[in-house]
Image: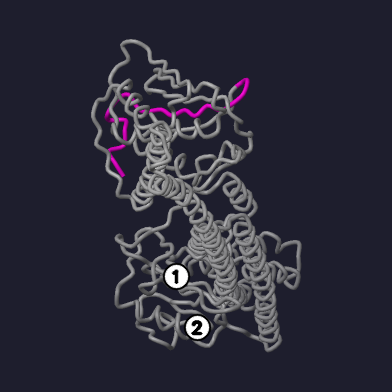
Amino acid sequence: MSFANSAGSSNRTSPALECDSESPKVHPLPSNTRAKEQKEARAQWNPRRDHGAAKSQNQKTEWWVRYPASLALIGMATVFSLLLRPILEPANLLMLFLLSVVISALRWGHMAAIVAAVSGTMLFDYFYIPPFFSFAISDVKYFIILTGLLTVGLVTSTLAGQVREQADAARRREAYTASLYALSRSLAVVNRLDQILEVVAYRISEIFERPVLILLPGDGGLEVGFSSPGLVFREEERTVANWVLEHGQQAGSGTEIMPGAEMHYLPLTASLRVVGVLAVKARHGDESLSPEQGQLLEAFVSQAALATERALLEQKARQAQLLQEADKLQKALLNSVSHGLRTPLASIMGTLSSLSEDQAMLDEVTRRELLDNAREEAGRLNRLVGNLLDMTRLEAGTLRLKVEACDVQDVIGAALSQLREAARSRPITVDIPAHLPLVPMDFVLIAQVLVNLLENAIKYAPAHEPIAVQARLAENDLEILVSDRGVGIPQGDLHGIFDKPCHGARVTGTEGTGLGLSICKGFVEAHGGRIWAEPRVDRGAVFAFTLPRHANAASPGR
């Protein structure tokens, strides 16, 4: 495949390549908005239809159709002239032959018009110049007439051919302008990099009827960003693509640089740098691109490069924002954990100090209260460290479930026993229906979920208000609810209440890291369930989660 302006042409071109079946391919599903925009753009301009029309008019009909058609037209003109011979002079009949020449030029091109002009001159000589029915010329004046007829026919055919070519060029320019507009409209409604590459490859492939591959630089070198189906990007072609990426010039088939390559490689040159490589490969037997088509391809590549650069910059901006948010989250979590560790440690150290220094002055009741308080704070500290370890397992993806059929009553009882000290002065009610079936779950993890939810309720509910635990069946799930009559949760905080770290508007002077609810979400979702929070009708909050009743519905682990 050759291009009119190859190695020395503009670098702002769009690269289209092929890839093998093992290369990664991007097949994003377009959004409704994007699909609508693309449908409207295709409705205004069909690239296959308009490109085909321009190509057929530019390349003309096959010669075995053009020339016989022009001869047939001259033959028809001859027949009509013979029919009109009794009423018209030969000079007037010349107009029929000239009209046939003009029609041949407009319809079939310059060469067909020349054939019509020569054959028309010979037929006029044969039928209308003495001696009749002979190609001989008896008088010089008749030779001048025939020469004038041939000259006028040739000039007319040339002028008519030029008009036709100009009209064809105008139609092609209109089609190319429409194609650029369609591409710009399609690129305007997408912002993800994979969508941009898909739009560019689709447009180029449709217009030029050539498969396309787009390569983008990655950590391991050039990687396939998008490829037309069935293309094979051979490893030996990678040298050409790397050269194009490094030098920002076209190379490969149809250029003076590495012309032996199978594909024509173009750099995606944006305002700052070369952001990728696009390669186009002609199918077997396809004709080369015309200079106008080469310019159109370069215009496509220019738009593709700018859109790709925009998407890459947006990706970097999003990554920077995510890193900034992660840094803020890490600092907030560190501060929260530090405070959560300091409080129980200070309480334990104070208790031990009192017991060691004032042992003789403390009665048995006071010493027992101090020990109970130290034990409670040690339990808090132990749960905090456990939450940190659980969060580490969740984020590292090393959590493994040990699923077995469990009695919900046993799980709730195990959770309450862990909170015996913290909940000793709290009224806690448990509502479990009789004959509740066994449910597959990881006993330890679900017990920890209940511990975290109950501890959260104890923390934010007044000491005299009851806390309720309820289990019930909901279709194919087991549903467990923990409700309190505390400060409640504002509607705006419900969505992010399980994010890490999150206290929401339930903070009322209590301490906490915000890890407990986040861990609950991770454990429940690992079982294939879901968890949510909602405000109570009167006052307080309800935390609920579901677990699949059947083992095959639960996730085997993470």
Residue 398 at least partly seen? yes
- Mark 1 neighbour density, 10 Å: few (under 14) some (14–19) many (20 or more): some
Asked if residue 444 is positioned above or below residue 326 in the image, the reply reads above
Q: Residue at x 59, y 48 (%)?
A: 39
Q: Residue 492 magenta-drawn?
A: no
Give the residue at mark 2: 248
**Label 1: which secondary element:** strand
Residue 1 x, y percent position in the rendering: 43, 76
Asked if residue 431 is positioned above or below residue 516 in the image, the reply reads above
- Residue sitting farthest toward the top: 434
**Mark 1 to mark 2 CA distance (whole Å):** 13 Å
Image quadrant assignment for residue 210: bottom left
Which tag, 1 or 2, sits closer to the chain's start? 1
Image quadrant assignment for residue 298: bottom right
Disc number placed over residue 398 in the picture, else none:
none
Residues at marks 1 and 2 touching, judged by CB atoms closer than 8 Å: no
Left/right of residue 19 with respect to residue 9 in the rendered view: left
- Mark 2 neighbour density, 10 Å: few (under 14) some (14–19) many (20 or more): many
Magenta range: 537-558
Give the residue at mark 1: 216
Tell me the colour scheme of the image. Answer: one colour
